[in-house]
Amino acid sequence: MQTPDPTRTLVADETALLDWLRTAQPGDRFLYHIGHLAADRVRGSAGLTDPQREALCRLADRVLALVTEDALTAAQRRRADGHMAYLAIKTSGRKAGRRFP
């Protein structure tokens, strides 16, 4: 049995993200994961159980889809423990043009 690593935490799930998004105002932030997102999504990686990893993958995929729809901006913040805090930030929903080629 895998025991969860307390520095790798699925803070929310897809339902919580969508519930938050319905009432969030532009600029509001939603913390959805603490850890290393790319590594934590890999099957067999230490720190998360398989159901937690699968939920994280669904959540991260949903965040990415909402970013492409211009409903969210995704951001990350380095924590003092060396892990990252992953944030979804509500946008105004208006296309401001792409910043990256």
Image: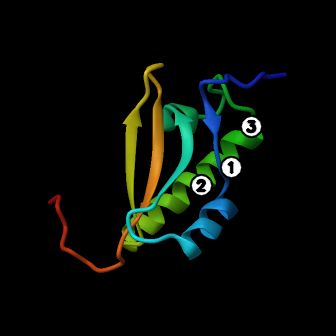
Task: From this view, report whether residue 33 is shown above or below residue 95.
Answer: above
Above or below residue 31? Residue 42 is above
Residue 45 in the image: state x and y as whole percent.
62, 26
Of 72 and 64, nearer the camera is 72
Q: Quadrant of residue 26?
A: bottom left
Give amino acid for label 3: Asp
Give the position of the N terminus as an image quadrant. top right
Q: Which residue is mark 3?
A: 50
Q: Determine crowd level at label 1: few under 14, some 14-19, many 20+ residues with C-alpha closer than 10 A.
A: some
The structure residue drawn at horizontal position 45% and vertical position 59%, both measured from the top left corner, is 64
Q: Quadrant of the C terminus?
A: bottom left
Mark before the other along the chain sequence, 2 or 3: 3
Answer whether labels 2 and 3 touch (C-beta < 8 Å): no
- Give the residue at the far right of this rendering: 1
Neighbourhood count class around disc 2 (C-alpha, 10 Å): few under 14, some 14–19, many 20 upward: many
On screen, residue 50 versus residue 87, left or right, reads: right
Amino acid identity at mark 1: Ala
Q: Nearer the viewer, mark 1 or mark 3?
A: 1
* x 47%, y 26%: residue: 83
Q: Which residue is mark 2?
A: 59
1 and 2 marks in contact (CB < 8 Å) = yes
Helix, strand or loop at label 3? It is helix
Label 1: element kind: helix
Q: Which percent across, then down, holds residue 9?
A: 63, 34
Q: CA distance from mark 1 to mark 3?
A: 9 Å
Label of residue 55 in the image:
1
**Dot 3: within a 10 Å radius of its alpha carbon, few (fewer than 14), some, or many (20 or more) residues?**
some
